[in-house]
Image (cartoon, helix red, strand yellow):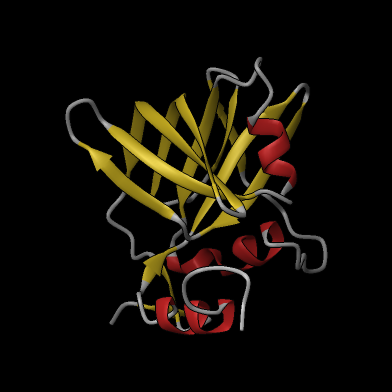
């Protein structure tokens, strides 16, 4: 017997792991430092206005940063198939001497080589269980036609 409603966390993870997703790095500026966090919980919400949503674990340093009043923007970087080491790095598994291809758009750090970058103004913060949802209004975007890094059943994959 559990003290919560719904399925167990293991069953949740196994079931939703069957949903293939792209891999993103959420970025923000922490005063003079660049910060990033790997996330696959990213979704388009609305075309008009252009809104997206990211989900951040309440234990993550990124949550503390995004909750600061002076942090008004965050970046979403959709990784290319060649950027798996960056995904691992920002998920807390850094490799030897990784070079992060940072660049900035109006002071917001973004990841170079990503197949898409979004600059989002923080619109709404929504507590949701052990995560917090951040709704962002897209103010800037750029993209390429390169292949994405895909995450499926707990492993990285490439298209084709």
Quarter of the figure with residue 102: top right
**Quarter containing the N terminus:** bottom right
Residue 135 position within the rendered picture, expressed as x and y whole percent measured from the top left? 42, 34
Residue 90 position within the rendered picture, expressed as x and y whole percent measured from the top left? 68, 56
In the image, what residue occupies the spot 62% across and 54% down? 130
In the image, what residue occupies the spot 42% across and 40% down? 117
- Which residue is nearer to you in this view: 12 or 44? 12
In the image, what residue occupies the spot 31% across and 49% down? 144
Q: As drawn, is 40 to the left or to the right of 102?
A: left
Position above or below: 14 against 34: below
Q: Is residue 137 visible?
A: yes
Quarter of the figure with residue 61: top right
Residue 28 position within the rendered picture, expressed as x and y whole percent measured from the top left? 62, 33
Quarter of the figure with residue 81: bottom left
Q: Which residue is outermost to the right?
A: 96
Position above or below: 151 against 131: below
In the image, what residue occupies the spot 35% across and 39% down? 52
Q: As drawn, is 148 to the left or to the right of 156?
A: left
Position above or below: 4 against 156: above
**Quarter containing the C terminus:** bottom left
Q: Is residue 155 visible?
A: no
Residue 48 position within the rendered picture, expressed as x and y whole percent measured from the top left? 17, 28
Q: As drawn, is 42 to the left or to the right of 130?
A: left
| Number of numbered discs | 0
Q: Which residue is outermost to the left?
A: 48
């Amino acid at each position: 017997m559990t003290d919560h409603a719904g399925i167990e966390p293991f069953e949740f993870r196994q079931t939703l792991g069957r949903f293939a997703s792209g891999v993103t790095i959420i970025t923000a500026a922490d005063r003079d430092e660049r910060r990033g966090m790997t996330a696959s919980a990213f979704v388009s919400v609305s075309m008009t206005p252009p809104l997206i949503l990211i989900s951040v674990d309440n234990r993550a340093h990124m949550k503390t940063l995004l909750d600061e009043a002076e942090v008004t923007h965050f970046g979403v970087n959709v990784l290319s198939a060649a950027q798996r080491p960056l995904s691992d790095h920002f998920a807390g598994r850094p490799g030897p001497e990784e070079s992060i291809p940072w660049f900035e758009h109006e002071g917001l750090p973004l990841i170079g080589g990503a197949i898409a970058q979004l600059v989002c103004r923080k619109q709404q913060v929504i507590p949701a269980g052990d995560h917090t949802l951040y709704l962002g209004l897209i103010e800037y975007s750029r993209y390429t036609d390169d292949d994405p890094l895909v995450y499926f059943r707990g492993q990285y994959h490439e298209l084709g």
